[in-house]
């Protein structure tokens, strides 16, 4: 049970961090452009994104509202997964839901990334978040199944047919 909670805590923390950073896209990109300097594809991509966000926020600040909702959804998902702390067996459906959502990132990133002209290397980075998220959820699901199996095989002396 403790292993489930430790992995879950890491997963929830990552969701919260992801959500909170989405509120501050422009300053986050600014810091990123300072860290990644040079003329390589990654540095150029970060500068292009920073420029686009800066111009958009100056001229159309209401568009950032969509990113705010993205941030909010990450925080809500983190709260949703908190029920697993109490009873991972009862709420195993949350683990499955999260696992499916993580795997769903791959086709969404591939399709929308292509449509929106996102560089392929960045689509791969986005897809990796789905894979990275799916790994702890798979571990939680396996551990929960073992926990569930252990509970099912325990005999209750009061309700046992031996008495």
Image (cartoon, grey):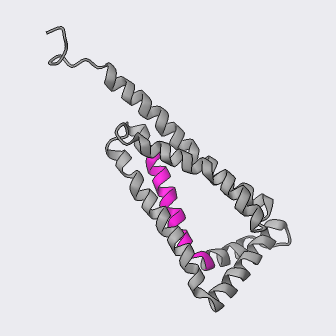
Q: For this view, does 37 lie left or right of residue 61?
A: right
Q: Residue at x 78, y 71 (%)?
A: 45
Query: In the picture, residue 39 is in which quadrant?
Result: bottom right
Let me know if residue 17 is in the magenta part.
yes
Residue 113 against residue 3 in the figure, above or below: below
Extreme residue in the top direction: 162
Residue 53 against residue 40 in the figure, above or below: below
Residue 24 against residue 100 in the figure, above or below: below
* Quarter of the picture holding the C terminus: top left
Extreme residue in the bottom direction: 59
Q: Residue at x 48, y 64 (%)?
A: 73
Chief SS of the magenta region: helix
Query: In the picture, residue 1 is in which quadrant?
Result: top left
Q: In x, y percent, where is residue 17?
A: 51, 63
- Give the total of numbered labels: 0
Q: In x, y percent, where is residue 126?
A: 67, 58
Q: In x, y percent, where is residue 41?
A: 83, 67
Q: Residue at x 38, y 24 (%)?
A: 149
Q: Residue at x 33, y 41 (%)?
A: 87
Extreme residue in the right direction: 39
Let me know if residue 139 is in the magenta part.
no
Which residues fall within the magenta stretch? 7-26
Q: In x, y percent, where is residue 96?
A: 49, 42
Identify which residue, 66 or 3, lies in the foreground: 66
């Amino acid at each position: 049970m403790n292993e489930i909670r430790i992995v879950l805590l890491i997963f929830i923390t990552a969701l919260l961090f992801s959500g909170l950073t989405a509120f501050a896209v422009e300053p986050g990109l600014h810091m990123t452009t300072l860290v990644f300097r040079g003329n390589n594809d990654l540095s150029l991509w970060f500068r292009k994104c920073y420029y686009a966000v800066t111009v958009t926020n100056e001229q159309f600040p209401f568009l950032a509202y969509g990113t705010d909702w993205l941030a909010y959804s990450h925080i809500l998902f983190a709260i949703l997964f908190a029920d697993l702390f109490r009873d991972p067996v009862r709420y195993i459906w949350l683990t499955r839901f999260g696992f499916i959502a993580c795997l769903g990132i791959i086709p969404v990133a591939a399709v929308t990334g292509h449509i929106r002209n996102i560089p392929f290397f960045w689509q791969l980075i986005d897809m990796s978040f789905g894979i990275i998220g799916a790994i702890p959820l798979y571990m939680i699901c396996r551990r929960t199944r073992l926990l569930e199996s252990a509970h099912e095989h325990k005999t209750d002396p009061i309700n046992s047919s031996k008495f």
